[in-house]
Image (spheres, rainbow, N blue to C red):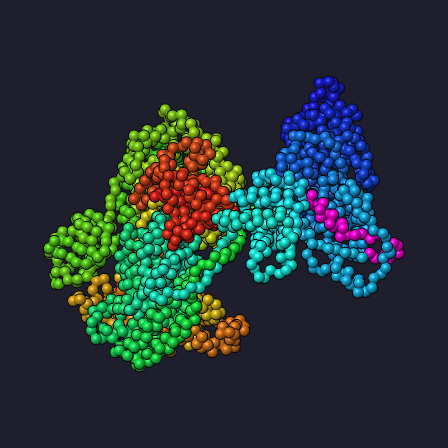
Amino acid sequence: MFYEDYGQDVYIFEEQTIEEIQNNIEFTTLEEYKKLTTFEKIYQQKSLYQHIKSLKNDYLKNICIKELSNSLVENCDEQLVIQVYDDILDTPLNDLPLQLLSKSSYVVSSDIPEVFLQEFPHSVNNKYAWIDKGDQIQYGLEKPCILIYPNVILGMQKTFNKTDLKCQADLVYYNNQLYQNQTVYFEQKGIRIMGQQFSKLEKFYVYQQSNNIDKTKTKLCKKLSKKGLIHSLLIQLAQEKFENKSSVNMLLYECLLFENQDWCQRIISQDWLNNVITLCLEDPKDISIFHQVVYDNLLQIDLNNYTEQQVDQLLLRLHQYYEANSLDLKQKKVEKQPPKKVEEPPKTTQQTTNSNNKQKGSKPKGIGYGDINYSSTYQSQQKKKEVQVLDSDLIYQQAEGYRWKILNEIFKKLKHLNLDYILMIEDSCLIPVIKSIISSLSKSQTISDKFEVIQIVFVLLNKFLTEEAMHLFTCKDYGDISLFEVIQKVNNESVFIQNKDNQELNQKIKQNFTNQDTQLSEVLKELQDFFNKLIIILEQNKYIDVKFEETETQQIQDPAYLYPMIMKPLVLRTSEVIKQAGWKKQLDEAYSHLSSSPPNKKMNRIIKELSDIGENLPLQLTNSIFLRYDKDRMDAMQAMIFGSSGTPYAHGAFLYNFLFCDDYPSRPPKCLLETTGHGKVRFNPNLYNCGKVCLSLLGTWGDNWKPNESTLWQILISIQAMVMSEYVYFNEPGWESSMGTVDGEKNNRGYCNIVKLANIRYAMIEQLQKPPVGFEEVIQKSFYLRKDVIIKEVQQWIDEADLPVNYHCTQNHNISAPFQQQPQKFKSILTAEFEALKKELEKLKVCITHQSDKKILSIMQRQSYTQIQQEKKKQHDKKKEEISEFLKSQLPEIDVSESNVSNRQFDIQNAEVQNLMSRYIGVMGLDSVSKQSQASVIIYGLGALGIETAKNLVLSGLKRLTIIEDKKLNNQGQFFVQNEDSTRLEQSLLHLQGLNPYVQIDYSNDIISSIKSQNYQVVCLCEVDSLKDINIISQICREYKIGMIVSQLVSVYGRIMIDLGDQFIVNDADGEQVQEFIIENIDQEQGIIEIKGKHNLSPNDVIELKEIIQENGKSLNNQQLNVVKVINKSTIFVGDLSQFGKYLRNGRGQTVKQKIILQNKQMSTIIIDPIFDPNFILDEQKFTIINEQMNRYSNQSGDINELFQKTGNQIFPPQAAYLGGIVCQEIIKAITHKYMPIRQCYFHTCEELLDGNHILGKDLQLAIEKCKVLLIGAGAIGCELLKNYAMIGLGINGNIIVTDPDVIEKSNLSRQFLFREKHLRQPKSYTAARACMKMNPQMKIVARLDKISPQTERLYTNVFQYVDIITNALDNVQARLYVDSQCIEHMKPLLESGTLGPKGHVQVILPNLTESYGSKQDPEENNEIPYCTLKMFPEDSNHCLEWARDKFEKLFTTKIQQIRQTFLFKDFTIEGLETTLKFCQNMPKNFNDCIQYALNKFYKYFVYGIMDLLKAYPLDHVVNGKLFWSSPKRPPQIFEFKGEEMQMKFIQSVSQLYATALGIEIPQQIDYEQTLKNIKPKEYKENKEKLQQIQDQVQKDAQAKVQEEGNQDNQQQSQQELINQIIEYFKDYYEMTDSTPKLLKSLDFLPQPIQFEKDEDDNHHVEFIQAALNCRAQNYGLEPLDWLTTKLKAGRIVPAMATTTACIAGLQTIELVKVIKKLMIDENLKLETFKNMFLNLAIPYALQSEPGECQYEQINGKNFSFWSKWDVHFSSQVNNLEKFITYTEQEFGEKVTCIKQKAKLLYSPIMFNSKEEEQNLLQTPIYLLFEIQDFEEYVELDITFQKRIKCRFYY
């Protein structure tokens, strides 16, 4: 920003020798300066100029220089002009005076046309020439050159940007004198120089420079000259259509004039030459230069580009020039032919001539093609005169020889070419010239004239074999074919010719071969030797791929012998697993939660397992397993398991999908079967048609997974051997008892037959027709080798089809139904499938091959090293632009002003209030919040601590808050004081009322009278005026039984003191949920209770028993017992129980909360003699002294230490936030009697932030202001953090980037204090940013709506690199782990935080010092409810709630989505088609039909379903001598529909939701009772298959969900049949095209899935959940849940409190300041300075600990942690993997066992099936192995020896 007023500085010019002007030259503005520039004497100008140069204000100095230069035009000294012009070019000014050029020292050439001389009237000796490079840099020039001045000379328009100026500035060419140091620069080919076209080009000014050379600028001149860009400019100018074309022509001629006789050595393009010729012929000027250039480049002229008249004119001029100069240039005289008159030729002759001279579409010939033979006929239709005919053939012959002489001179200079200039070689046309020379060898008879050039070419080719340059052979940037292909072509031709035995040689070729001279033969032989060497080197470096032709060999007759040999290389390979549709469908959801950088523990384990698995998997003709892992992510796999011979799965190819989650190997991988006949076949009781695999190792049937022992190999073998066995039927638990019986064998045979049929259909035929990607070769070769064995075994199946069989227990009713009544039909269908299989097997055309000696060469496309570096630079610049654009993100305008709100009644029973405070109620409970709604509190003091306490208290809710202001306090940290228009009290009251309209907020001036009004429960002093006042208030509070809390902040010390009376009762000391448990057995004599599962009971806990069944006698039910001793995790001792009746069975228990009575000392006592809470670990002696100092400071008496004197009135706002949260929570405890209060004093300090006797200090404050911080999350913690940042001035000279994708909901308002009701549905980040910018207008905040996740990783990679620190305000572990991984990758500090109810934590994570967030994770609790428990045997009301939640998802989301997709015929499935067909058969037409649907669902769930369950398992059913319905199973009762409240709620909610999903109009008035009288539910029909399913499911505790809608009752139908039946219902909407329906018009019945939304109370979502769960609870005799509890649990609402949030955000900000101090002020700050915090406000408890240090491992004397990165600068383009591994092993002295990039395995011995494969990979250039995203500066690798390190590889 420039200012007109330059401040108080006065610039005074002084010239000691000129006394008369000493007092006249002074100025402070440009206007004053202009008055001083009218001096007559030149020395005055000089003196003034020296003064101008000494000015300190650059802007003023530059302007003054320009003004002075204007004044020098009329009257000046030449030396001063030069000096001023030199300096003015160093300024950023562009509009320079042209007239000054005419005054400066330039020589104007006499050859310049008169029109140019008008601009250069003075001719003086020259010294300098300048070229504008955007920044006006001065250059000394070395030889005669061209000056193009962009601003003035080109008449630049304002539309031209800086880039254009720079491009034009580079347009300077220097001649061949720069060939010194044996470096030749060739013209850059085909590059457009201008970023923008010249739309208006009026004048060019060209002048010549003398031979004065500025030696100091030679280096810079070379840098410009290497590009030779002037010729490309000429091409551009000649091709454009300019208004002033003569100016363009003139420029071209002047360029030629200034070139010397070495011009012909420049290899220029055909296009350029054609443009020159065209312009010359139109407007000839200097024909001598024109002839020289055109003649020397004669062979490049394509006469087809010109008219016949132009051709005649061109050749005539060339002949004249040749005639005059041939003796001098060629040492040969051209015989002139006698002139002859040219007659108009006959028509046929003209056509022939045109055919010869104008071959349309012919390709222009260039250097090296000596086969052009032009002829011309001269015509003179317009001018009837005689002309001389030119013998063009003779000219071309002489030009050819002369051309090779020129090339010879050039290549002599190239012989010692320095490959350091590889970039220049790539940009030149050297490679095309070499290609042309080599290509000419195949058409030459003699090479005597070019032999020397060719020898130099071979020298260059051998130079190119170096690693830096070998890419030049395969690069196709220089034409359609590469240099390698040209060499190959010429070599192949020469080999063919030299093969004298080849019968195909014709006589002409032999004759040519005979005529070849000895030199050519030597050259061709040398070329062959070079080509053979070239193949070897390029293949080794992966520039070409060399394969050998395969020829068929006779197959070995023994497939069993051949199978392992052929299939071995296919056992373990990579594939694109995660891209496969089947894998994605089954596992994509789980995959989306994986970290982009997988945990090391997981990856190392996977690598270890894969290294062993290849050798150990079965590989026989009778059974085999093949494995594929994803090429980019090793944790995604597929296994192809071939069924073992002798089983119904024999030879079938079954595809299993695997995903190893981030908790592997702690938990087993996810495994699903994809081969399920598209969901129609259950191949085994343990292989569900949904893909679920029941196996104890997988944790899906029991849990036998042992992290340190179990492996993937065990899983694969177990599936093949134990699951896919011949005992299919007996795999079902409970059925194994029938093994060996007649019925059991018949049932097993029936199940096996169905598996055999499905095996042929889906695991054989379908796999042959559509082999899974990655297993194509496995399928082809395996079935080919097994063909005879398969036919033999299937024939045996057909023979066994006549055996006695039962098809009623196959669990595949849709397939077995036709055979249940007619078992003999199975044989015929099996035979038909067998015939289809044989046809597929016959189609197999697989042959065993061996390699021939014939090579097939192919080029592997790859970028050159220089291209990579250029791309990296572009990417670097792009990143700068991206982050710049990112920081310019516009923040929308959002109204964050505060307005008056009217008070509302705080009625906790009100649904709106409950919705607002739902998260808080989830912590405190409804009873506690109800107490708060009746409570009143006084807060004294509105400083930082007072406003924090008041803010938290208003958010938490209470009846009334009275504020008493203490005007002595300053506004430091008072975030509600935002303007000067009103007082602090007024602003605070306005903002506090806006936080919660349900709280009455008022103020008072008299605290004593307010307390005595007896309307208050708590008095909180947030400031201490004097101890005398404390004593007075304490006495009054005691008298009126009011709780009293004193809190105070002085300097960096804070204290909280509490007095809640003589006896304060705590109803709930910790707020934890009561523990419930199921009783397994009671030993009354021993007094021991055995508990099912594990418990968390402790001695002295009180438990209550219920639901115990016992004999007559004293009941144990409702008895409260003390836990005397915990024997083990499942057994407790409670004392003698013999007085109770005999225990029989069942029983439950739960802990009972015990009240605690606290006795408090009076406040006047503890403020003098504090009692420290034992839960806060403090130095009591130290804080006793601090307490005394705080008392002295408050009284302003006694010996106050220096720190308190200087900083006592200062506070640190984040500390106030922390203490304000604690104080508020203590107030709430006093009101609700929930949670344990502080006993009775707590102290806190931030001494680490002291700088002498100052808080923070100047340097740290400046660092805070400059800091750049990324805040992730703008919720509760995020709002508090932003407020703290505003209060400390964070980022006001840096940046704060905050991102959060969420919008503001009603329930957020009780914790997220920056938001108001008017902000509902607004983005959180935008609103929070606006609110904080109002608190501190200097804040620089960039607000975004992005979710930080792998999906936004590319966008935020730049952000992570840009910011200094990351602060988390996240609410889920997955996101925290991801951010943690990004901070590790980018080496950035992270401040991690989180809350859960009254608990919270802060973790400091510092690069290279501390452990990370992911270093230690709490074990994940497995809260998964067993499927049978959820579906049939709920044990408590929570199980009923989860069941209801599942039903909501199924009825209104999943099924509706399936129907929608089917109607659109987009991503539909067989299951979706079946669901849609059933919907069409019963489609509701009106709302009454929806009520009918709801009634049917009621009877299905609560009547008929219970009837089925009781029929399957009657109440007296016994299993293993024990009643089936024993604890924990509850016997259900049928719940008849009687129109009760919950029943009606169910009907209402289901009908409304169903109508909403289907778009059916809902009447405003609905008489449900009357409607229900007129309809009846579906009748009950007993379904044996359904009963069997119930029994099947009971036997296993699995989560695989069976179909419930009776789809099994339908006969198996093909997809097409289902589609056709659906279309029948909607004929007017669809037409069939290629078996796929096409939509004719928009559907007016398209259903819309409903997503569960917890925060809208009138949408019937929570109502459905409550009604469904309570109806089910009534079925099972469980306690019902109220609406609010249902909402909290169904919505998975995380309990949260404003108090905990404020505390954690305050602590997090305190640690943030310490991190800034370490980063920017004191890097030696010790780790012990930082503190991790675990906080529990309920107990209360605050544990501060030093952050855990990261663990280091030592490798060859080098220490490594997970932070460490070994930086390697190693050319990835020229070095292969083997060299890198060798280099690494030398560095670390250990053998490399694995290299990976994130989840992609780059190298490991497990990857190879042979040494040849390994060697092939080792020879691969490293660059080809990497996944390089956007040309990052480096790639990050993980290298494993016996230990693991990270490596940053700079490629």
Q: Position of residue 113 (x, y in %)?
A: 82, 40
Closer to the camera in the image, 77 or 1032: 77
Could you tell me which quadrant the N terminus lies in? top right
Closer to the camera in the image, 385 or 403: 403
- The residue range painted magenta reads 378-405
Q: Is residue 193 above or below residue 1634?
A: above
Closer to the camera in the image, 1736 or 284: 284
Q: Is residue 566 above or below residue 517?
A: below
The residue that appears at 74% across and 40% down in the rendered structure is: 261
For residue 1842, say whether it is visible.
yes
Q: Position of residue 302 (x, y in %)?
A: 73, 54
Closer to the camera in the image, 149 or 1448: 149
Task: Name the residue at the right extreme.
Answer: 384
Q: Position of residue 1668 (x, y in %)?
A: 34, 66
The answer to whether residue 1498 is magenta is no
Q: How many marks?
A: 0
Left or right of 1465 on screen, residue 800: left
The residue that appears at 76% across and 42% down in the rendered structure is: 331
The residue that appears at 26% across and 61% down in the rendered structure is: 1435
Q: Is residue 60 above or below residue 1568?
A: above
For residue 662, say whether it is visible.
no
Location of residue 1406 by image quarter: top left
The answer to whether residue 380 is magenta is yes
Q: Position of residue 547 (x, y in %)?
A: 48, 56
The residue that appears at 74% across and 30% down in the rendered structure is: 81
Left or right of 692 on screen, residue 252: right
